[in-house]
Amino acid sequence: MKKRGSVLLAIGAFLLANLKWILGLLKFSKFGTTLLSMAISLGAYAMFYGWKFAVAIVYLIFVHEMGHLVAAKRKGIATSPAIFIPFAGAMISMKDHPRDAGTEAYLAYGGPLAGLVSFLPALPLYWYTQDPFWALVIYLGALLNLFNLMPISPLDGGRIVSVLSTKIWFIGLIGLGVMLFFSPGPIMVFIFIIGLITWWNRLRESYQHQVLQTEKEMVHEFLHEIAQWPTLESSWYKRMSLNERASRLAQLPPQKGFLIPFLHDEQRLKRDRERLDKVYTNRLLDLFREWEREPVLFIDSDPNRPAPSPTLEEGERVARQRLTEVEEQMHRLSTYYVAPASTKWKVLAAYLGLAAVLSIFFVIGQQWLHQGF
């Protein structure tokens, strides 16, 4: 333990002493984050498992992540560089969201497919040298990518099978739950929690669609309301009406208590409707007050040609932007996981085929590894 502590202190001292150089590297190259995080992961793995294991696991993870990056580039989706996380693998984030589950499945499939290719060169090297290290590379490569094919979101397998049916995620959660029971670990617990949240959110998408539909109607009412203001003969009645409406909503008793999802969705939707009504009523009132204080401008100084109000134009722009966002979310909820039967069959065949090949190499690598020791 003292030796490991000394190593950690040495690494920390090195990083502090070379902080300026490290920051320069990150700024100079978009791959600086990848290289630095890779070096840190390499050192962390080497400290606990030795350099051979460290080189093997970092190499396998790197090729896996490059598979995702290549697939994303082929689909025209911008991503961040890969970031290595010691003892947790690596990750990339998408700057653009895939347009549908089929595209997301393509991106997800690129990782395990590249992972399979990554350890194939170890086969002839093992046959030629009989060095157990190459058997370890095969075993680790197959295990890493086979685990990633588990049908749980956010693992690659969960993103792939979402084209078939997101109900498969629940089966994957049961399988991972069994694994956790017999062999608990922090990484698997984290994946289980994220997978559970993702599965639950998918179950609740129909309710989310209802809430978005309610907000869409309120945005339309908002736009219709402000369009009438320039034609008002007097703003006094409108101001009183808005004040009265805002006051009435503010006086509504807050709805407390836990509402059971699905069973109490009607009450929950009523609560969300009241919340949105308060939001948009207050926005109307604030906008009206600002519009009233705004000086009236005229085109070419003609009193019969009032110029459009900048305040109302800005209010309309913001409202239409939100309307576009709501409609996009509704469209996504309705169509994201819809795919033709031909796509589903191709995805199923590709998924099962890759899982079968990786399973074979997992068994082979395990046998060769035992023979070597």
Image (cartoon, grey):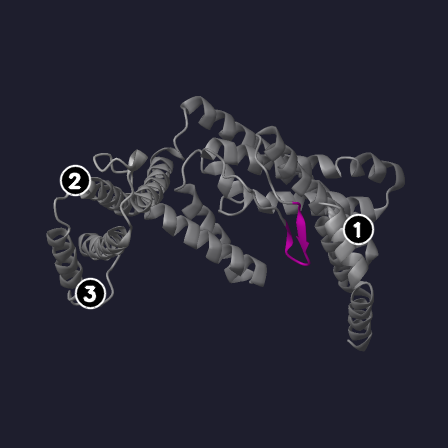
Q: What's the residue type where badge 3 is placed?
A: Gln
Q: Percent position (x, y) of residue 181?
A: 50, 61
Q: Percent position (x, y) of residue 332?
A: 38, 37
Image position of 271 (left or right of 166):
left
How far apart are the alpha carbons under marks 1 and 3?
A: 57 Å
Q: Which residue position holds label 1?
A: 55
Contact (Cβ within 8 Å) of mark 2 with mark 3: no
Look at 26% across and 50% down and name the residue there. Answer: 291
Any magenta on residue 281?
no
Please name whichever residue, 287 or 119, is drawn nearer the observer in this view of the structure. 287
Does residue 289 lie above or below 347 as drawn?
A: below
Image position of 114 (left or right of 156):
right
Does residue 166 lie above or below 261 as drawn?
A: above
Q: What's the residue type where badge 1 is placed?
A: Val
**Which numbered dot is residue 255?**
3
Look at 79% across and 39% down and name the residue there. Answer: 122
Q: Percent position (x, y) of residue 16?
A: 78, 68
Of marks 2 and 1, the one in the foreground:
2
For the record, the magenta segment spans: 81-90
Q: What's the residue type where badge 2 is placed?
A: Thr
How far apart are the alpha carbons under marks 2 and 3?
A: 38 Å
**What is the quadrant of the N terminus in the image?**
bottom right
**Which numbered dot is residue 231?**
2
Image position of 20 (left or right of 183):
right
